[in-house]
Image (tube, rainbow, N blue to C red):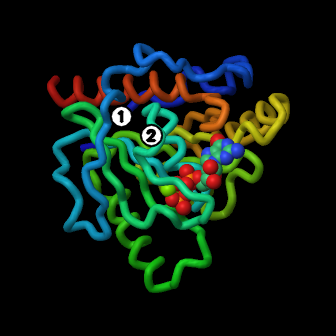
Amino acid sequence: MRQQARIGRGSCYNRAMPNNTNKPPQNDNALPAILRDCEFILGAAEVAQFPDDKSVEIAFAGRSNVGKSSAINAITQRRKLARTSKTPGRTQQINFFTMGDNARLVDLPGYGFAQVPLAVKEKWQKTIHKYLAERSNLVVLVLLMDIRHPLTELDRQMAEWARDSNLPTQVLLTKADKLTKGKAAATCLSVERELEQLGGQFGVEPFSSVNGLGVSIMRAQIDEWVSDALAGDNG
Ligand SMILES: Nc1nc2c(ncn2[C@@H]2O[C@H](COP(=O)(O)OP(=O)(O)OP(=O)(O)O)[C@@H](O)[C@H]2O)c(=O)[nH]1
Ligand SMILES: [Mg+2]
């Protein structure tokens, strides 16, 4: 059964926005141990290729080009752990990365990218759906949305699905460096209010892999989700 991670404490709704100058600490000591030395495990195009489900997993999902792979790199303080690209549709498999010995980060292919051939897209979608629906070791979904146009129809479907699946979900509003601090804070609040209407377990944070906004918060969150899930497993 899925562990219930604690989500949404200290989100933008009840905490002052950090300054946009709030760069991620470059000091390695600031990285929780679990986020040091992450390694690529494999890329899976179908369910049969998934690694075993004995490790706790945190998956990054969202529209194509929203910044999933960049967020994973920023959080792990690595340049090229996950492959990024200006061209949407870069991540074409479900990529698994180690986080210590008992946990993994998972980079999902983006949804909503029209240029990918339909047959390919359907295959990914089926695999992504199976991953999200059936992965019993998935403890938190990190759902990324572009802060300039959040909660698109597909984002909404994803959020509703997460609520119906009782899956704790951390929304990251990406590319926050593209907005003023005030506009970013306002968007964050309105997204949070809309998600409150949905019910479910949602936290919302502004995020930028360019200026580091939200990066240290996410590091601390991931550390906590993993320790809680592993403690739950043992207890
Ligand atoms: N300004 C800005 N650009 C960003 C940010 N995050 C990502 N980008 C850019 O957005 C583009 C897509 O980033 P990726 O991390 O590859 O996006 P993705 O969601 O993994 O994309 P797919 O794998 O295609 O689904 C790249 O050109 C990045 O440099 C951000 O926080 N701020
Ligand atoms: Mg990607």
| Residue that extends furthest to the front in the rendered view of this protein | 79
The amino acid on which the numbered mark 1 sits, given as a three-letter code, is Gln
Question: On screen, 1 above or below 123?
Answer: above
For mark 2, what is the residue? Answer: 168
What residue appears at the point 55 percent right and 29 percent down from the top-left corner? 215
Q: Quadrant of residue 6?
A: top left
Tell me which numbered mark, 1 or 2, is placed earlier along the sequence.
1
- When the figure is inspected, residue 130 is found, relative to residue 116, above or below; the finding is above
- In this rendering, position of residue 83 left or right of residue 192: left
Q: Position of residue 171 (x, y in %)?
A: 57, 41
Q: Split into 4 quadrants, where in the image is the N terminus?
A: top left
Q: Secondary structure at mark 1?
A: loop
- Which residue is rendered at x = 51% and y = 84% of the image? 118
Inspect this view and state whether residue 166 appears.
Answer: no
Is 35 positioned to the left or the right of 121 in the image? left
User: Label 2 is placed on what type of residue?
Assistant: Pro
Q: Quadrant of the C terminus?
A: top left
What is the number of callouts on the image? 2
Task: State how far apart marks 1 and 2 are (Cα).
Answer: 7 Å
Q: Is mark 2 within 8 Å of ligand 1?
A: no
The residue that appears at 33% across and 65% down in the rendered structure is 130
Query: Which residue is the site of mark 1?
Result: 4
The answer to whether marks 1 and 2 mark residues whose Cβ atoms lie closer than 8 Å is yes
Q: Quadrant of residue 24?
A: top right
Image coordinates for residue 181, horizontal then vertical, percent: 81, 29
Establish if 84 lies above or below 129: above
Give percent across and percent down for residue 55.
21, 41
